[in-house]
Amino acid sequence: MPFVRRGMVGGTSNQPYFFLSYARRDDRATYVGRFYNDLLQALAPPVKGSARQPAFHDVENIMEGDDWPIELSRAVGSCRAIVALYSPAYFRSEYCGREWTHFAARVERYRQLTFVQPRALVPVIWEPVSQREMPAEVRAIQYGEAGLGEEYLRHGLLQLMRSDPGGPAYRHVVAELAERVRRAADPFNLPVDKPPAFDLSKVQGCFPPRRRTGTHRPRPDLRRGLHRVEAPGGAFTHHVLRGSPVVVGTVQPAARPDRGGASQAGPQR
């Protein structure tokens, strides 16, 4: 990836300030890109000396010719915070499940090492989701707080954008979320997992629910803080301690992961 890209908000060039985790099905009419753009504007101006740390949005930060699995692994394994857009599609996406699970494990490893519980995961109600659709690990993290407004809690951020784009309710939510991103990203230095030893595509996410088969596959245990990662081809097994304005559609990278949208080449998300 180039050393400097648009959307940078603070720190070092190889550790995203936050990672935007979303289902591709939810980016209808580029609403996700518009929210990301507004969130970056709400985070501006960056603190002094901070212009070299990017936020990470896949269509912005992964360029034509980049290796999608490696760049996603690097971003999820090193980002300071994650902004997760909760929706029914999000909890049906395997790649979103991997992103959420591995970041939550990095948070848990930090807690085990420091006895401090960082609030580095910033949930966003993109579309309302029944708690039945969420695994217990997700429900355990508070995601609906009164300070964000009743309309947001009831209908989600996407509906606010559709009904009153740029309106006061939407602007209030974005400003509150920006403050939560600052509180998530600035104080903590989470453990970092780097490729090739860390491969996001090998993470067993805590969602979506897996179909029943004859082989039992245990759920990831975030409390233990470990998960098993096999290198491509089975060359080795590695136990990993768990721990911008947007220009949407101007580049057509090859092998883009699918975040739950239409079928395309590359990893299915």
Image (cartoon, rainbow, N blue to C red):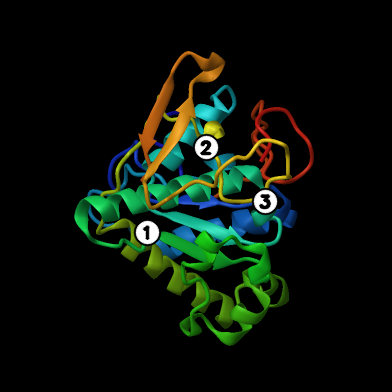
- Say which residue appears at 67% left-offset and 63% top-offset: 133
Q: Which residue is mark 1?
A: 120
Residue 72 in the image: state x and y as whole percent.
51, 36
- Looking at the rendered image, the disc whose residue lies closer to the viewer, 3 or 1, is 3
**Residue 178 falls left or right of residue 148:** left
The residue lying furthest to the left in this view is 114
Towards the viewer: 260 or 142? 142
- Looking at the rendered image, the disc whose residue lies closer to the viewer, 2 or 3, is 3
- Disc 3 crowd, CA 10 A, few/some/many (<14, 14-19, 20+): some
Q: Which residue is mark 3?
A: 209
Q: Which mark is residue 203?
A: 2
120 up-or-down from 239: above or below: below
- Say which residue appears at 43% left-offset and 48% top-offset: 103
211 up-or-down from 131: above or below: above
Q: Toward which corner of the image does residue 257 lie, by quadrant? A: top right
Q: Amino acid at mark 2?
A: Val
Q: Marks 3/1: CA distance?
A: 24 Å
Q: Toward which corner of the image does residue 41 lie, by quadrant? A: bottom left
Towards the viewer: 266 or 64? 266
68 up-or-down from 89: above or below: above
